[in-house]
Amino acid sequence: MAALPGELKYIQYEHSLESVYLPAIRALISKDLSEPYSIYVYRYFLYQWGHLCYMALNPSDSSLVGVIICKLEAHASHSPPTMRGYIAMLAVSATYRGHGVATALVKKAIDAMTHRNADEVVLETEETNIPAMRLYERLGFLRSKKLHRYYLNGNSAYRLVLLLKQIDPDAATDLSLDEVDTGPS
Ligand SMILES: CC(C)(COP(=O)(O)OP(=O)(O)OC[C@H]1O[C@@H](n2cnc3c(N)ncnc32)[C@H](O)[C@@H]1OP(=O)(O)O)[C@@H](O)C(=O)NCCC(=O)NCCS
């Protein structure tokens, strides 16, 4: 683990940055995945919800240190439907972990989703991913469901949820998987 190279720059993703940053985003995220995503999965999120995706950049050369990719959609499992934020991917370069970079990225994403009227934010993470579980639980996420053998490698996941507004539990059906889930985050 190295010291941070000065104060990182946190910027929102935008389409004009694709050619500069998409290869680095894919490389950073796929490093820790057992099943790499296709380019279309990245574009699915970044084309529609680039405003909910943030990057942490090294101030000296603007290289990518961390990234979070999210979406926000109406979700019909409650009546009336809730606005559900979803954290699809989060990764920080191994060299710079343990300095609060992921915490800052998650907080920025939550703020952006709150600003757009999200009722809740959900995600799945591998039950063995202790750093991720600690990070999210420290930020107030709760375990809503265990997803047995969720990943192709046979590992189970937890679905975590952060309630941003009071949701009537009697109006809720199951917190089922998003229709367009992409597996690990
Ligand atoms: C999970 C992951 C994103 C965490 O990134 P990170 O930048 O190291 O996370 P943070 O630094 O915000 O938090 C990690 C620890 O550093 C501590 N920390 C926070 N700010 C700090 C600071 N300024 N100085 C020192 N330590 C700090 C936190 O308290 C936290 O400790 P914890 O063990 O009590 O949770 C990273 O390990 C990663 O990329 N893993 C691979 C991909 C992955 O698993 N993604 C998540 C899938 S859901």
Image (tube, rainbow, N blue to C red):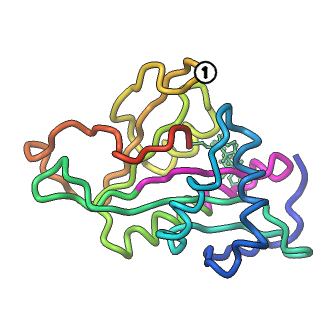
Determine the residue positioned at 78% across, 51% down. Answer: 27
Is 102 situated left or right of 6 in this image?
left
Q: Is residue 179 magenta?
A: no
Q: Quadrant of residue 60?
A: bottom right
The quadrant in which the C terminus is found is top right
Q: How many marks?
A: 1
Determine the residue positioned at 56% across, 59% down. Answer: 69
The 10 Å Cα crowd at callout 1, few under 14, some 14 to 19, many 20 or more, is few
Amino acid type, mark 1: Asn
Is 145 situated left or right of 67 in this image?
left
- Residue 71 place in picture, x, y as percent: 44, 61
74, above or below 183, in the image: below
Does dot 1 land on a helix, a strand or a loop?
loop
Q: Which residue is mark 1?
A: 153
Is 164 situated left or right of 51 in this image?
left
- Residue 46 place in picture, x, y as percent: 56, 66
- Residue 120 place in picture, x, y as percent: 32, 56
Q: Nearer the viewer, residue 159 or 44?
A: 44
Magenta segment boundaries in residue numbering: 86-104
Q: Quadrant of residue 62?
A: bottom right
23, above or below 143, in the image: below
**Ligand 1 closer than 8 Å to label 1 CB:** no
- Residue 175 place in picture, x, y as percent: 27, 39
Q: Nearer the viewer, residue 29 or 100?
A: 29
Determine the residue positioned at 72% across, 67% down. Answer: 56
Determine the residue positioned at 75% across, 48% down. Answer: 98
Is 4 situated left or right of 129 in this image?
right
